[in-house]
Amino acid sequence: MEGPWPVVAGVIGGLLLLWLVLVAFLAMARPKGNALTESLRLLPDLLRLVTRLARDSELPQGVRIRLWLLLGYLALPIDLIPDFIPVLGYADDAIIIALVLRSVIRHAGPDALARHWPGTPEGLSTVRHLIGRPQ
């Protein structure tokens, strides 16, 4: 094979492998039981929470940057996991939000979550369960 085709094939193969690793990681990181279904129901409140946290100047700058990057990802018109993939296709945004919120709470503390939560106390309890911090 002559020309750039071996390099192009290698890059495409590498990207495909990276995408498969991402799908496997999201499948392993997804919440167990009905927490994923509940998080999809809470998605509007989760988006408001992420926006409020990203605008909070009291949080560390690294945490706010992570939140703004998450909002940028959520604004993209394409998903990393297409919707035709069962379970993960529709839930990838909720899974990624949960992973970022785990990191945010680890660095900013659970009080930031409670202070900015826009929904009901039951919803806050569900979010805490989703991110692995039940209280």
Image (tube, grey):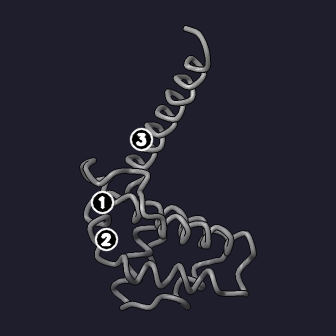
Q: Nearer the viewer, mark 3 or mark 1?
A: 1
Distance from Cα at disc 3 to Cα at disc 2: 20 Å
Q: Secondary structure at mark 2?
A: helix
Taking 45 as reference, is 105 above or below it? Answer: above
Distance from Cα at disc 3 to Cα at disc 1: 15 Å
Tell me the number on the disc at residue 90.
Answer: 1
Q: Residue at x 48, y 64 (%)?
A: 76
Distance from Cα at disc 2 to Cα at disc 1: 9 Å
Give how far across and how far down residue 39 sits, in percent.
34, 71
User: Label 2 sits on what residue type?
Assistant: Leu
Question: In the drawing, does residue 134 fall left or right of residue 103?
Answer: left
Image marks 2 and 1: residues in contact by CB distance under 8 Å: yes
Comes first in the chain, label 2 or label 1 = 2
Q: Tell me if mark 1 has few (under 14), some (14-19) or many (20+) residues whose alpha carbon lies within 10 angstroms of its own.
A: some
Residue closest to the eye, 133 or 94: 94
Tell me the number on the disc at residue 24.
Answer: 3
